[in-house]
Amino acid sequence: MTEISYKKLYQQIVDAAANIQYTYTAHWTKVNSLQTKQTCIKITQIALTALSTGGFLASLISGTPWLSWIGGMTSAIALALNLYSLNFNLPADIKAHTDAANELWDVKESYKSLITDFNNLSIEEIRSKRDSLTHCVSQINKKYPGTDNKAFAKAKKKLPDYMFENGESAKLLNICEKENEV
């Protein structure tokens, strides 16, 4: 095999590894977005329920009829929010994206290992590992929901946060090694 073919194969593997990092980050971004949405819905439901109950109780105690209207309106809004949230299964969606990200973590690390070992493997071993990883990613993509454009856009902005500067990881490991010695 020619040197150009090796370079093309290496570049293909590097590109695939970058795509996995991107998708992995997008899944975690989607998890965070869904958790925020779920928290907002729950807090809003609690607040609306408290307001409607408070409105009715205040109306009974004070005899002020307009407080019943406030209680009724907030109760109707709470009902609408509850009906709206029936269309979603946020806990299941959060779990699916978390599971996808966790499985992609293994693939991501396997790609890193393949890149590290690239020069020490035969072309057949490289292709075999590449094909195995491609199949694994395909299975993950079939098994779990995809992310959306919003998650990918946010992931693109977050990716630099996941990268170490030159020497940064070595410094971190050195700190960890010193902590383990104590």
Image (cartoon, rainbow, N blue to C red):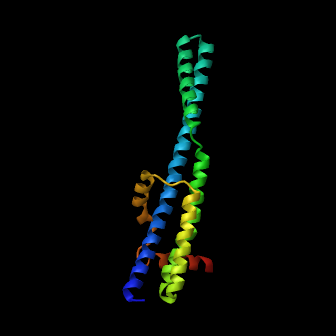
Expressed as whole percent of the image width and height from the top left, the position of residue 81 reads 54, 32
- In the depicted structure, whether residue 152 falls above or below residue 131: above
Expressed as whole percent of the image width and height from the top left, the position of residue 150 reads 42, 51
- In the depicted structure, whether residue 107 falls above or below residue 124: above
* Residue ID at (43%, 80%): 10
- Horizontally, residue 10 falls left or right of residue 126, namely left
* Residue ID at (40%, 55%): 153
> Does any portion of residue 124 appear in the rendered image?
yes
Expressed as whole percent of the image width and height from the top left, the position of residue 163 reads 44, 69
Quarter containing the N terminus: bottom left
> Does any portion of residue 174 appear in the rendered image?
no
- In the depicted structure, whether residue 136 falls above or below residue 37: below
To which quarter of the image does residue 154 belong?
bottom left
Q: How many labels does the image show?
A: 0
Quarter containing the C terminus: bottom right
Seen from the viewer's position, the closer of residues 8 and 168 is 8
Extreme-left residue of the structure:
4
Extreme-front residue of the structure:
1
Seen from the viewer's position, the closer of residues 3 and 164 is 3
* Residue ID at (53%, 48%): 34
- Horizontally, residue 2 falls left or right of residue 112, namely left
